[in-house]
Image (spheres, rainbow, N blue to C red):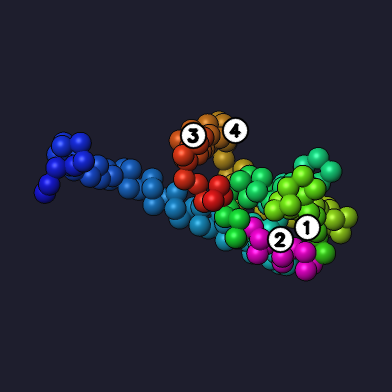
Amino acid sequence: MGATEDNTEPRAPRWLSDGEQRVWRSYLHATTLLEDHLDRQLQRDAGMPHVYYGLLVQLSQAPRRRLRMTELAKSAKITRSRLSHAVARLEKNGWVRREECPSDKRGQFAQLTDEGMEVLRRTAPGHVAAVRQAMFDRLSPEQVEQLGAIMRVMAEGLEPTGPDADLPWLR
């Protein structure tokens, strides 16, 4: 093996311990099942995947129920290309409309329509019930607090804020 760029020997991989491997696999299994559970519920109740529901929720909470497309991509943690495709589908359903940005000819806003807001009103109770049944009803209040703290630490470490951050939703 050769030296690294700074003339130090390459480090051996830090493999996961047996306990870490069990936790990692449990995490992957649970998050895959949870996302599938929520996708199925939303497809059944509203004909949309979970990511689309999340976009509608974000727009519903924004001032005047609209966000710049770049801000929506960033907050949803998806690429602009994936967002553009999702918004096109939501537009086709009449739930979102795009508006040109008057201050930036290249920019666009996504705005939640009244019909989109009504879809959220109808769908939210079933979605909350699915989240509660799949997650919160299974955890003690202490576990909920611990899970929240753990997720915040993980998110902070995975979302660099520097100007050279290479994140898909910033491209």
Residue 51 against residue 19 in the figure, above or below: below
What is the secondary structure assignment of the residue under circle 2? helix
Q: Amino acid at mark 2?
A: Val
Residue that badge 3 annotates: 162
x, y percent for residue 22: 35, 48
**Cα distance in 3D space between marks 2 and 1:** 8 Å
**Cα distance in 3D space between marks 3 and 4:** 35 Å
User: Measuring 11% from the left and 49% from the top, which residue is drawn there?
Assistant: 1
Q: Main secondary structure of the magenta part?
A: helix
Residue that badge 2 annotates: 87
Residue that badge 1 annotates: 98
Closer to the eye: label 2 or 1:
1
Among the two numbered marks 2 and 3 on one chain, the one whose residue lies closer to the N terminus: 2
Contact flag, marks 1 and 4 (Cβ < 8 Å):
no
What is the secondary structure assignment of the residue under circle 4? helix
Closer to the eye: label 3 or 4:
3
User: Measuring 66% from the left and 60% from the top, which residue is drawn there?
Assistant: 84
What is the secondary structure assignment of the residue under circle 3? loop
Closer to the eye: label 1 or 4:
1
Residues rendered magenta in the picture:
83-93
What is the number of the mark on residue 141? 4
Among the two numbered marks 3 and 4 on one chain, the one whose residue lies closer to the N terminus: 4
Closer to the eye: label 4 or 2:
2
x, y percent for residue 166: 47, 45
User: Measuring 77% from the left and 49% from the top, which residue is drawn there?
Assistant: 101
Q: Amino acid at mark 1?
A: Arg
Among the two numbered marks 3 and 1 on one chain, the one whose residue lies closer to the N terminus: 1
Residue 139: image quadrant is: top right
Closer to the eye: label 2 or 3:
3
